[in-house]
Amino acid sequence: MQGNVDAATQAWIATLGPEELALARDYTTGNHWLILFGLLVSALVTWIVVRSGVLDRLSGKLEKRGRALRTFLIAAVFLVVDTLLTLPWTIYTDWWRESQYGRTSQPLGDFLAQGAISLVLTALIGGLFLLGIYALIRRSGHLWWAWSGGLVAAGVSFLLLLSPVLIEPLFNTYEPIPEGEVRDAVMELTAEAGVPESRVFMFDGSRQSNNFTANVSGVGSAARIAISDVAMDEASLDEVKAVTGHEIGHYVLGHVWRTVTVVTLLAVLIFWLTDKLYPRMARLFGTDAAISDPRGLPVLLFVMSLLATLAQPVTNGLTRVGEREADAYSLAHVGLPDALSGALIKTAEYRYPLAGPVEEALFYTHPTVANRIRAAMAWKVANLAEGSVSE
């Protein structure tokens, strides 16, 4: 029986030609290297900002202002400066490289326009969040890292409520699925799972990406399931049903709350380590600002980003667990293992399907396509009467 499962998995992988696999391998490996190079770029920008003294001068000019306003403005200005300094790198990684691999068709002008919107949101929301962090550092002393975990939990929960209503519509158009057999099939599945019809959408994901994707976002009354128009255009009816079942799995299993919990706990650990590492890193970058001084924000955020990068295997592992559970939900409630496998194959273009266990553990936010298809084929053998793993 295991031989049948392995053979069926290989048959699905074989639908990708050697050139497609090589391209996916190259793209995926490049993404891994971008993590390291991104840290180097971040370190360089941190060094430039600290050595330029721009925040020191700004702090001096705002010395007579209230502490809260001074902190917010310094944080907001740094976030803007940091974004502008890293813009060439961002254009290369998120637009030019994606265009070269056929992962996006977005014009550069639209990419930059959406980046400008992101910059405004980052300056406002990020500035307020950092204002809270510095307030906790001043008032809680060496225990600021413990209290900051609560701020992260509140902030993430607030964004989850706000994002589907106010933020995501700034970047994409969300509409009901057009009338027809696809909508009927999706509405039938969501109704069976108790998902209100008003929370299921199609969005113009093709504006930014050619990737075959769908997602669940938000919490409570703001939660919704959204399927990209790319998936709608490229998938068969059964594949849409299988993908919808997967997203329903995320929705009904409450994965978002588990993510909030783990991210909060991980944030506490990162804040604690940041508190220990900051003095040494501040000396390394050449600033005399204490951790409670907003002038040291570039170093503070660099340390946090470094630790967050090192923690990626943990967060990736959490995400992979959720993806496996959502796949299992789709198989159990929709029962279309071949359709799910067909949909998964479409994601192999940008996520190399045959990565080994170490690479998967370190870098993959989803189980490899081969492993996910193998699970689908195993479910098919165990649950379908004919026990066949062929179409």
Image (spheres, helix red, strand yellow):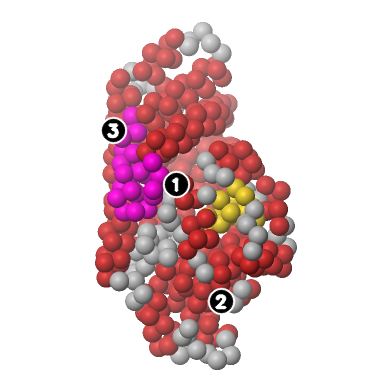
Tell me the CA gap for discs 2 and 1. Answer: 29 Å
Q: Position of residue 27 (x, y in %)?
A: 30, 56
Q: Nearer the viewer, mark 2 or mark 1?
A: 1
349 within the magenta span: no
Q: Secondary structure at mark 2?
A: loop
Q: Position of residue 363 (x, y in %)?
A: 37, 57
Q: Are marks 2 and 1 in contact (CB under 8 Å)?
A: no
User: In front: 160, or 301?
Assistant: 160
Residue for point 45% across, 68% down? 344
In this rendering, is residue 61 above or below 217? above
Q: Amino acid at mark 1?
A: Gln
Segment tinted magenta in the rendering: 85-107
- Quick one: SS at disc 1? loop
Q: Residue 246's quadrant in the figure?
A: bottom right
Q: Which mark is residue 44?
A: 3
Residue 48 lies in what quarter of the image? top left
Dot 2 or dot 1: first in sequence order is 1
**Residue 280 appears in the rendering:** no
Is 33 left, or right, of 242 in this rendering?
A: left
Secondary structure mainly formed by the magenta segment: helix
**Left or right: 177 in relation to 311:** right
Label 1 crowd bin: few (<14), some (14–19), many (20+), radius 10 Å? many
Q: Which residue is mark 1?
A: 208
